[in-house]
Image: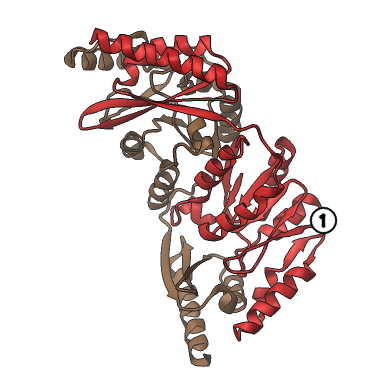
Chain colours: A brown, B red
Amino acid sequence: MLAIGDELLSGRTKDKNIGVLAETLTACGIDLKEVRIVGDEPQMIADTLNTLRRSYDLVFTSGGIGPTHDDITADAVAAAFGLPISEHPQAVALLSAHYEQRGLEFTPARRRMTRTPQGASLIDNPVSVAPGFRIDNVFVMAGVPAIFQAMLQNVLPDLPAGQAISSVSIPCPFGEGDIGDPLAAIQSRHPAVSIGSYPSFQRERYSTELVLRSRDEAALAAAARDVEAMLAALAARS
Amino acid sequence: MLAIGDELLSGRTKDKNIGVLAETLTACGIDLKEVRIVGDEPQMIADTLNTLRRSYDLVFTSGGIGPTHDDITADAVAAAFGLPISEHPQAVALLSAHYEQRGLEFTPARRRMTRTPQGASLIDNPVSVAPGFRIDNVFVMAGVPAIFQAMLQNVLPDLPAGQAISSVSIPCPFGEGDIGDPLAAIQSRHPAVSIGSYPSFQRERYSTELVLRSRDEAALAAAARDVEAMLAALAARS
């Protein structure tokens, strides 16, 4: 994923799209491998996009597709692909009808939102009409969270089916320091399972959530049994 | 910044550290230029860190410095620098005293948290003692938000003084489509000022927050006057 916007780097806006994309892809069995956040700099956006689209099967971008001068994502994406950019006829039709209906002028600024690299297909925006677009393996979507989420729902049917990842979450009353050694042993016995350990610290006490994830149900169940046995042994000792 | 952890990419955990670092650096006059999020993969962490530490003056990492098998940041940082890793005597002293006081065993897992690349200096952790560390221009800090924030406060005095960025936020009752064209003209007249436009959509209506940022107070004031004049002209017209 590539999240775009000076406001994310200045702290003015706290990103909400990364977590949503991560959750949604995980539910679809698609692994999110890397996220980058960059500012409103055309060359930086284009270079980063080129790196990501060549490294990964799919890339999702957020931000920078509105009508103002700081919305430069479409141009940067076109530059990254070395493609010309122009008004997409279908986007022009959608937006001109939308503004006419609302009695608003179809200003040059608003027309900016119809510009896509040559060959792009549109991503529907049920919230505010101005579309995102897909070009090759890159999905270009809005930064406003409600719109990003709606666009993401619209592209899900186009994504390749992943193999769902199953997960088991096991609450653990011990801190990470108590379980670290036996847990490492369990992890090395179950290489097909990814075991994560997430501490929390409340009322001066540590506890931990253990999350086991795998695409292999049998391996997952076996690892979960070992973790439960470890916790029972620790409880008996304490 | 480099945020590390499978849990950020699976959506299990929603990052809270990026926004805090962004806000804090901005307040110090330091520009955050790029953020990357990667999973618990040693080579990926090391390669990404090498790219970032060579591209930027300072790099901050979050995550992966606890006592469990998935806490591999210290090793990955050592590998990135090509440095040996070993128990930091000061960290061993801190943690052994801490666990002794609490009547807890200083397990091998807990000892893992004392390991730093050769030449690293420690970053105090007032929340749960186990320290972060600095090596060269890289600050390695915890992923748990309360600890990340405490460590960040502790390293602020060591950061080079930036020139503070001033900002003016101007609420705007018009949507981006109405202001896009005149705002672009204002931006091009005031190159020393960065003008951001952030739409919101509530009760079926758009409004926009305009944020002007600059290190030049006079330029900022001049641009703000132009924006106010633009808004007054639009209000008179509507």
Check the image and report above or below for A182 versus B159: below
Which quadrant of the view contains residue B177? Answer: top left
Which quadrant of the view contains residue B112? Answer: bottom right
Camera sees residue B135: yes
Number of marks drawn: 1
Q: Position of residue B174 (x, y in %)?
A: 29, 20
Q: Residue at x 32, y 39 (%)?
A: A153
- In-image side of B126 versus A153 (left or right): right
- The one nearer the camera, B138 or A237, is B138
Q: Residue at x 41, y 18 (%)?
A: A68
Check the image and report above or below for B49 versus B183: below
Check the image and report above or below for A58 versus B233: below
Quadrant, the N terminus of chain B: top right
Which quadrant of the view contains residue B92? Answer: bottom right
- In-image side of A14 versus A191 (left or right): left
- The one nearer the camera, B58 or A179, is B58
Q: Position of residue A209 (x, y in %)?
A: 46, 69
Q: Residue at x 34, y 15 (%)?
A: B231
The residue singled out by tag 1 in the image is B83
- The one nearer the camera, B206 or A233, is B206
Q: Position of residue A31 (x, y in %)?
A: 48, 49
Q: Amino acid at mark 1?
A: Leu
Q: Secondary structure at mark 1?
A: loop
